[in-house]
Image (tube, rainbow, N blue to C red):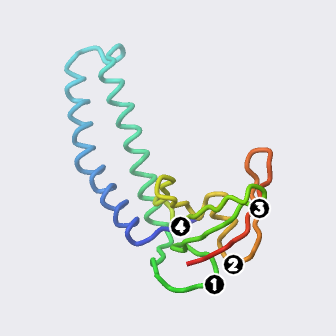
Amino acid sequence: MSKIITKETYEKLKKELERLKTEERKKIAEKIKIAKEFGDLTENAEYQSALEEQKKLELRILELENLLKTAKIVKKEKKKSNKVDIGSEVEIIDLSSKKVLKFKIVGFGEANPLENKISQESPIGKALIGKTVNDVIEIKLGNTVKRFKIKKIS
């Protein structure tokens, strides 16, 4: 399934991939070369550690290549919409506690709870996408089902 990301996130991931392929591969290759000089590779902790690091790096490179190949890029638009979508700022009220929560719905790789940015792939994000003001959503959190009402979309 393709991930939905913004152009900015696409570019950020592309830069990370390029850095991993050039700088990080060189660093690890150098670590492996130095570790080989310590002798017996079967009992060489530095060598084993460098190989493990290389494995993790190559997995991350494959993950990024696949993500960038299959990602669906959306534009961040400041359009007025009556439906929740990526880029929407949403105000919801917890129907049991009456607590008001504010979120910005963002694409893959942009979520940041400290900035109240939640992914469209999160349980709340999935429940909100496509909904309108006054819609009530239900979200299962652990063993409880919470009900929220959408107060505002901007």
How many residues crowd mark 1 within 10 Å: few (<14), some (14–19), many (20+)?
Answer: some
The mark that comes first in sequence, 3 or 2, is 3
Which residue, given by chain and number where applicable, does mark 1 sit on? 82
- The picture quadrant where one finds residue 76 is bottom left
Of circles 3 and 2, the one toward us is 3
Which residue, given by chain and number where applicable, does mark 4 sit on? 104
How many residues crowd mark 2 within 10 Å: few (<14), some (14–19), many (20+)?
Answer: some
Of circles 4 and 3, the one toward us is 3
State the CA–CA distance, disc 4 to disc 3.
Answer: 20 Å
Which residue, given by chain and number where applicable, does mark 3 sit on? 95
In the depicted structure, whether residue 133 falls above or below residue 64: below
Amino acid type of disc 2?
Val
State the CA–CA distance, disc 4 to disc 2.
Answer: 15 Å
- The picture quadrant where one finds residue 132 is bottom right
| x and y, in percent, of residue 96 in the image | 78, 57
How many residues crowd mark 4 within 10 Å: few (<14), some (14–19), many (20+)?
Answer: many
Q: Which mark is residue 133?
A: 2
Contact between marks 4 and 3 (CB within 8 A): the answer is no
Amino acid type of disc 1?
Asn
Amino acid type of disc 3?
Leu
Identify which residue, 147 or 16, lies in the foreground.
147
